[in-house]
Image (spheres, coloured by chain):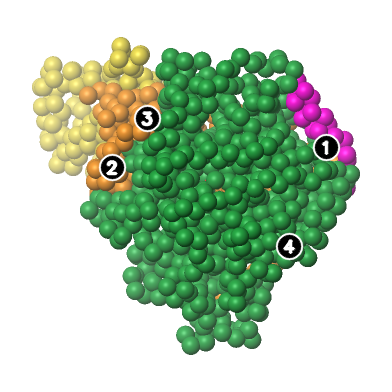
Chain colours: A yellow, B green, C orange
Amino acid sequence: MQWDLNWFICTLRSSIGKKLIMALTGLGFCIFLIAHLAGNLTICAGEDAFNSYSERLHALGPLIILTEIGLLFFAVAHVFIGAYLFYENFRARPEGYLVKKNAGGRTIGSVTMPYTGLFILLFIVIHLVDFHFVEKTDQTIYQIVLETFSNPGYAFFYIVSMIIVAIHVSHGFWSAFQTLGVSNSEYMSVFRVVSIIISLAVGFGFGILPIYISFIS
Amino acid sequence: MQLDSKIPDGPLSEKWDRHRFELKLVNPASKRKFKVIVVGTGLAGASASATLAELGYEVMTFCIQDSPRRAHSIAAQGGINAAKNYQNDGDSIWRLFYDTIKGGDFRSREANVYRLAQISNNIIDQCVAQGVPFAREYGGQLANRSFGGAQVSRTFYARGQTGQQLLLGAYGALSRQIAAGKVSLFTRRDMLDLVVIDGKARGIVARNLVSGELEKYAADAVVLATGGYGNVFFLSTNSMGSNISAAFASYRKGASFANPCFVQIHPTCIPVHGTYQSKLTLMSESLRNDGRVWVPRSPEDKRPPDQIPETERDYYLEERYPRFGNLVPRDVASRNAKVQCDMGKGVGDTRLAVYLDLADAIERDGRDVIARKYGNLFEMYKKITAQDPYETPMMIYPAVHYTMGGLWVDYNLMSTIPGLFVLGEANFSDHGANRLGASALMQGLADGYFIIPYTIGDYLAQDSHDTVREDHSAFNESSLQVETRIKKLLSIGGKRTVDDFHRELGHILWENCGMTRKEKDLKKAKKLVADLRVEFWENVLVGGSGQEFNQSLEKAGRVADFLQFGELMVIDALERKESCGCHFNEDFQTDEHEALRDDENFCHVSAWEYRGEGSKPKLHKESLEFENVELTQRSYK
Amino acid sequence: MTKARDKSCINLKLKVWRQKGPDARGRFETYKARDVSTDMSFLEMLDVVNEEIILSGKDPIAFDHDCREGICGACGTMVNGRAHGPEKGTTLCQLHMRHFSPGDTVVIEPWRSRAFKVIKDLVVDRIAFEKIIQAGGYISVNTGGAPDGNAVSVPQEVAEKAMDAAECIGCGACVAACPNASAMLFVGAKISQFTLLPQGLPEAKKRALAMVGKMDQLGFGNCANETECEKECPKEISIENIARMNREFLKAGLL
Ligand SMILES: Cc1cc2nc3c(=O)[nH]c(=O)nc-3n(C[C@H](O)[C@H](O)[C@H](O)COP(=O)(O)OP(=O)(O)OC[C@H]3O[C@@H](n4cnc5c(N)ncnc54)[C@H](O)[C@@H]3O)c2cc1C
Ligand code: SF4
Ligand code: FES
């Protein structure tokens, strides 16, 4: 039987296996988002706090590089498998319905998952170009942040992006637990509530920054 | 033709054991060489297919539906009996045997019924092992409930979906054999003829319902498990596809048909409410465990049920039958409902209904307990009638439900055509003139899991079989006949639809050969059915072609057979000049209006032999010997 | 109180998918359903429309059905964009016309999924479900030799949970309703039933791998936890069963 031979690969190649990867990488991003958010919020403690947070982060050296490589790896997996799943799902119904109504299961999060995902990918590229790969020799990260957000167009884009991230997370978080098989009828509602809380925290926490900054500057 | 029931000698309780020992065995290596056709995937057919394949036979299995799991058995609600005596309430194999014989009003074979009771226990064990999620007590032991016609609690159940769960168990076993390559499954096939070569059943002709093609299949034995013929009445609790066609084709080829007039009318169904109605819905008999049946005392009383005080209600079953109360057998309960309605005491818009009231039980046990037992039945009732049974009593009326009659079989379940075996509701074997609740599932599974595997071996081992192939001339002849008939049906191009004819046939039979019968009515019905049949062949409109998926054509073939069969039913009812069980002839009743048997003249099975279109079938009698029970007037008072 | 039942009749406009055969091109056709009693079931309404079509010499609308009691799983179409119509926990045969209003347009389409080919009109081929069950949707016991039914106790709540899952009627509405045409609810329900019961445990691992593997092969989509299946399932099978299947599968595949 093919299962015995290549069981690990086979498991990962199955529909549930692919979803497992989506779930694990997705949860990884959730953890990253929370850590990132905590870091960002040091901006509220003032310029020094924020810069020293940034410095301490970079002082971690190889560890940070390892994390970055990890995140990149996660992102590639999440994006490619997500895209592949999307393609397979598209193929699974060659002829659509003339009328199709929501029976009450779908949420904005779930309906828009592939699209919010795609948007987030774009956002991340822009975000990295703006903040990560930016030339940092003659200005502190605090200044960069201040400068970038002082452009109202960019601030708006950023806020919208964060709302979209929140929408993505609202479905993604609980969905990951469902895929991992952790949820049962008792926990399911808990995961769904936590999912909403986290997405609100992410949307609000990140989205508030540009507004906060426009106030202080 | 001689009817030989092949009942083994010896004491009742040892017959089956002895018989099994005496049956010839097919050696394991040879089994592979035998092909067996099983038509039907209900409890009987699915269990037989799976078990025969496990033994090593090469099995071909057929059904009408797109999946074996959708056979009519799926709809059975209430439960399955077994003499486990888990409740320690005095049950035993003997008691189950006795209840069944008595319930059938002494018109079944002692030996068959005893065997059924013996096997009942193995069935439960088998099903549990297959993962059937039977209801359990808190302690984890199997739970039981009571059913009509018994004073012990011996019915095993899985909510209100026992048939579904048992069938899914058998379907699982069947699927496993399909995966193992031991069963070839043919779905969406309609068996239209039996092929008999040198006097032996050697194959079938079936129509592929998707492509419309006629297909031929040859084998060493044919097993029919095609269910009952309740749909001859148009309205019944049977699935829409339930039919007589396969059994009737076999009858035309020489298999005797036994007791066709024995039709069970179930007391607790949702009443008819319109002419467009396509089927009737059963409310499981298990409701009678906790429900009380009543009508207003006065025919003038048109008040809603909650305004009728206790003293003005007539709990007629409890009053007339104090010992069994609401749990009298089905025929008795049905007839009494009809009597009440005939007196004008019926309720509801049509006045053809009685109340089945669970208010007392809800009060006693609480809504939760009742919901756990009957929740899904209540929901179903609400969906159909838009009334909430938690608030207002349900309305019920009897409806055609089960057919005790069927192809005649001997103790080995073989019909009068060697090599043609008949299982489940399609045979006549175990229920006499009335079947007790929860015993059809038991019989279907007994036949399929535990009887046919032995008896078919005996037949195959004895016989010298030359291989027959599908190109044998008998197959061509048969296929040609079927084709001619299909062409005929399509070419009539009349003015009435198939359903229209079916509805009228049902009406004739329900009025004249239903819950109560009279000689005069039966004679009238015989003529009406014959006339209707003539009109059908001149004036039916089928439409479409034979070379495609054509549901109208499928139905037309079935109704054509029902029209012929309906007459046989009436003939049988006319011939049986007594009342017994479900067959209640008003001319034969006790002073208390109970069925009056005539054991001297009618203690027999009536088996009818086909003698060509237009000639009266020939009656053969298999007399029933009762050595272990005393024939008594059935009393549930 | 016995409410006087609504005996009213309504007129409807039906837009029905008609397709001669698996390879034929289909299209929508419009029919009038006149004087539909609100006590009728949806299928009885179609019966009446079909009678008229037959009498007018045309080909009646083909649809699958058998028990008309909500248990065989044969019936099912999309009705106005909802699998089995708008009522919760109801099969098409149990849907009654009292849930429609006079003058409504009713769009009737077959289940759509790559794994379910249209055979004719509203009839689809669900053989894929058979294949999945054949892959392992059973407990491998031969007839005979089973121990006493009470030899192994099964706690009541476990039996009830297993029964919740076992109630699936194999209708395919979950696939039809799923935005991704995934069969996870159907497969999850079967795997759950046998995982919960002690009798099913010995094969649990093999079963999960085989059934999921088969499901993947047959062209169903991937579950994205949209939960539409649970909402449309006529037996209200919970997606908890999908989680349980995921767990069993991952346990079997990775541990
Ligand atoms: C609503 C209802 C509730 C019931 N509840 C109970 C209960 O609680 N307890 C109990 O013991 N009994 C009950 N019964 C009775 C019991 O369900 C049936 O008697 C029993 O299931 C019959 O099983 P079977 O295998 O003989 O046939 P069926 O289940 O009827 O199967 C017939 C099979 O034959 C196939 N077939 C038929 N004709 C053809 C053909 N021409 N060509 C090819 N294939 C064909 C069909 O496709 C099907 O697979 C109930 C019956 C009804 C109607
Ligand atoms: S899970 Fe529900 S919707 Fe899916 S096949 Fe089973 S009963 Fe139908
Ligand atoms: S016809 Fe059987 S479920 Fe609808």
Image position of B193 (left or right of C255):
right
Closest to the camera, between mark 2 and mark 1, is 2
The crowding category of the residue bearing disc 3, from other C-alpha atoms within 10 Å (few below 14, some 14 to 19, many at least 20), is some
Give the Cα distance between marks 4 and 3: 47 Å
Residue B603, image x and y in percent? Answer: 59, 56
Circles 4 and 1: CB atoms closer than 8 Å:
no
Q: Are callouts 3 and 2 both on one chain? A: yes
Q: Residue at x 68, y 45 (%)?
A: B620
Which residue is label 4 attached to?
Answer: B512
The residue that label 3 is drawn on is C142
Can residue B178 be seen in this snapshot?
Answer: no
- Residue annotated with mark 2: C148
Q: Which residues are magenta?
A: B476-495
Q: Secondary structure at mark 3?
A: loop
Three-letter code, disc 4: Asn
Q: Is residue C234 left or right of residue B240?
A: left
Q: Residue at x 60, y 52 (%)?
A: B604
Looking at the rendered structure, whether the residues under marks 3 and 1 are on a common chain is answered as no
Please name whichever residue, B581 or B273, is drawn nearer the observer in this view of the structure: B581
Q: Nearer the viewer, mark 4 or mark 1?
A: 4
